[in-house]
Amino acid sequence: MSRNIDLTLAINDSDQVRDLASGKVTVNGVDLRVTYHEVEEIFFRFTKFREWEISEMSLGKYCSLRGAGDDSVVGLPVFPSRAFRHSGIYVRADGPVDDPAALAGARIGFPEWTVTATVYQRALLQHEFGLDLTAIDWVQGGINAPGRIETLPVGLPDGITVRAERERSLNQMLIDGDLDAVIVPHTPDAATDGSRRVVQLFSDVRSVEEEYYRRTGIFPIMHVLVVRKDVFERYPWIGPNLVTAFTQAKDNSIARMLSGTAPHVPVPWGATTAGIAADIFGGDMWPYGVEANRTTLDAFTTYAAEQRLTATKLAVADLFPASVLQSHVI
């Protein structure tokens, strides 16, 4: 009598994986144990120790590994986290609000060079706003607490210099006037403490991000699902099976968000807002799979090469095994 294999998944607690965790959606051939952690803990523990078989992982760190020839993990086109990142550029309230060009030659802080959000944000500064990245005074440090370090070896583009700050947080440096802006995946404390000392660069960031998507077709991918190589080689069939199950769980989540009869999230007008997003994105507002995300993936691999996360541009096909690059049609 055959039985399923036991595998552990580490992932952030989000609605699109809820049905997997509850067992409502199953992975064919797998008994899946789900363990929830904050993403920073997941990335640190999996990058350092590979403690579980399946993990959420930063797309930037995954590309860095692949670009360095490290194939110890296998990526799958499942994207648990996505976010437009114009909203993660912060300045002081008396700074260049709505004037990104004024950041030319500025002092800008970031948490880690390989953090996926900052890759997109540097690309925005360069490609959308015309800034010369080599003219910027870059400072690396913790967002709201000092001491954060790079967790992967970093190669920097020619002309880029970075100073590591260990004594103060980026939030404090921005308040003190020693930074002109920060590019971050998490909100600086001074933007939410009621003081209004720190604000988003764009005062109407939703409109800016929506226009960017309509014009470019890029919906930034933050995280990707990965499987340890030893597990994938032993059970190569788990790749497509995981993609199928994660897609079903995500589709169920979207259906819940769109249902206004009995709201599933405690957000006023939540279903209406979800419906607007579905109209903008053409139905599936959170697509998995390669083809539906080729524009975004191609853009990111371009940015990763420009910013020296990878020595050369990775092809999209280099990121995922052949078994998940296409799907069957009935």
Image (cartoon, grey):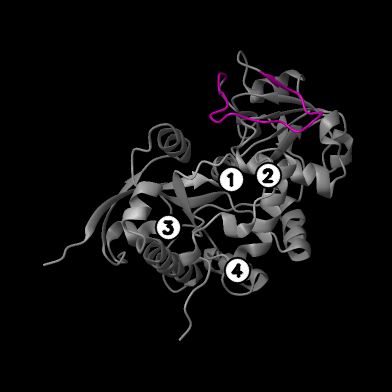
Residue sitting at 67 percent across and 50 percent down? 301
Q: Is residue 14 left or right of residue 146?
A: left
Q: Which residue is mark 4?
A: 291
**Where are the magenta residues, as a range?**
146-164
Residue 18, given in percent of the width and then of the height, sits at 37, 58
Disc number lying in front (3 or 4) = 4
Question: Disc 3 marks which residue?
Answer: 15
Tell me how far mark 4 sits from mark 2, CA to CA.
20 Å
Q: Secondary structure at mark 3?
A: helix
Tag 2 secondary structure = helix
Marks 1/2: CA–CA distance: 8 Å
Magenta stretch contains residue 159: yes
Q: Amino acid at mark 3?
A: Asp
Q: Residues within 10 Å of mark 3 (few under 14, many from 20)?
A: some
> Can you identify the residue that label 1 sits on?
63
Q: Is residue 130 left or right of residue 259?
A: right
Which of these two is toward me, 114 or 146? 114
Residue 31: image x %, image y %?
A: 24, 58
Is residue 124 at least partly visible in the picture? Answer: yes
Image quadrant containing the N terminus:
bottom left
How would you rate the neighbour count of disc 1 (Cα within 10 Å): few for under 14, some for 14-19, many for 20 or more? many
Q: Which residue is mark 2?
A: 304
> Pointers 1 and 2 in contact (CB under 8 A)?
yes
Indicate whether 273 appears above or below 133: below
Which corner quadrant of the image does residue 101 belong to?
A: top right
The earlier-in-sequence mark between 1 and 3 is 3
Give the residue drawn at x 15%, y 66%. 2
Label 1 or label 2, whichever comes before in sequence order? 1
CB contact under 8 Å: marks 3 and 4: no
Main secondary-structure element of the magenta-colored stretch: loop
> What is the x, y in percent for residue 149?
56, 23
